[in-house]
Image (cartoon, grey):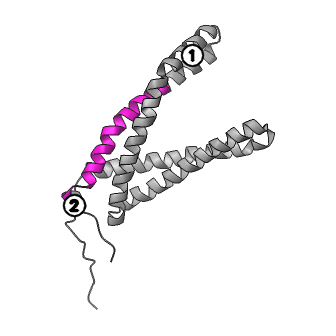
Amino acid sequence: MPVMARAESGPASRGFALWRVVVWLLLLLAAFGCVQYFSHAQLLWAHRVNLSPADSAAMQRMLAWDIGYLVAALVLIVLCAGCILRQAWARAPLRVAAGVLVLWALVSGGMMVAQWPQFDRASAEALAQLGHDAALGEAVVHARRVFRITMALKGAAIPVLLWLAWRLGTPAVRMQFRHRR
């Protein structure tokens, strides 16, 4: 009986490819986001019974955002897995998703930059009032650090995601993807 080998379309590039590393990182970050959004939604759902009607409406809005983010993260995981497996159906949608993530980083980062003066002033006032309480003061300092790190990561993600979207469209990378039979 002859041995059947599966013919791959395009050259089999088995060397190091930075775009694959970026896709893996994107997949891992999306998986981390899924865990965060799911656990936050569980926490909100657990506390839904003791809320006033106004608080209940706010909780429903937060739950809707959590579910929306969760679905988007799950879609991103599927697209990243498809690209890691070099499935042609995933390449173009991941390019679009990278573009959407760039727009989201620009919008949310811009909103954070616009809110920085208010956040800085409020955290400085809180530090002045909590000067004697070291634990709460440390929490405020931590919140300021997280705010700055988040802005920096959004700024760093923009060129990386733009590069990924461009790289997935190049002929050399496009040839590495398999089409369905």
- Please name which of the two marks, 2 or 1, marks the residue nearer to the observer: 1
Q: Nearer the viewer, residue 144 or 110?
A: 110
Instruction: Read off the residue under disc 1.
Output: 122
Mark sitting on residue 13: 2
Q: Where 2 falls versus 109 (above or below)? A: below
Q: Nearer the viewer, residue 16 or 62?
A: 62
Q: CA distance from mark 2 to mark 1?
A: 53 Å
Q: Is residue 167 left or right of residue 48?
A: left
Q: Which residue is painted at 63% across and 11% down in the image?
A: 130
Q: Which residues are magenta?
A: 145-172
Q: Amino acid at mark 1?
A: Ala
Mark 2 crowd level (few <14, some 14–19, many ≥20, 10 Å Cα): few
Query: Please, what is the dominant secondary structure of the magenta stretch?
Result: helix
Residue 24 showing in the rendered view: no
Q: Which residue is painted at 62% across and 47% down in the image?
A: 64
Circle count: 2
Quadrant (top left, top right, bottom left, bottom right) of the C terminus: bottom left
Residue 129 on the magenta span: no
Mark sitting on residue 30: none
> Residue 26, image x and y in percent?
40, 48
> Residue 62, image x and y in percent?
63, 41
Q: Which residue is painted at 46% across and 24% down in the image?
A: 114
Q: Where 85 falls versus 181 (above or below)? A: above
Secondary element type, mark 2 = loop
Q: Amino acid at mark 2?
A: Ser
> Residue 170, image x and y in percent?
21, 55
Secondary element type, mark 1 = helix
> Residue 13, image x and y in percent?
22, 61
Residue 181 showing in the rendered view: yes
Q: Residue furthest bottom?
A: 1
Residue 160 on the magenta span: yes
Quadrant (top left, top right, bottom left, bottom right) of the N terminus: bottom left
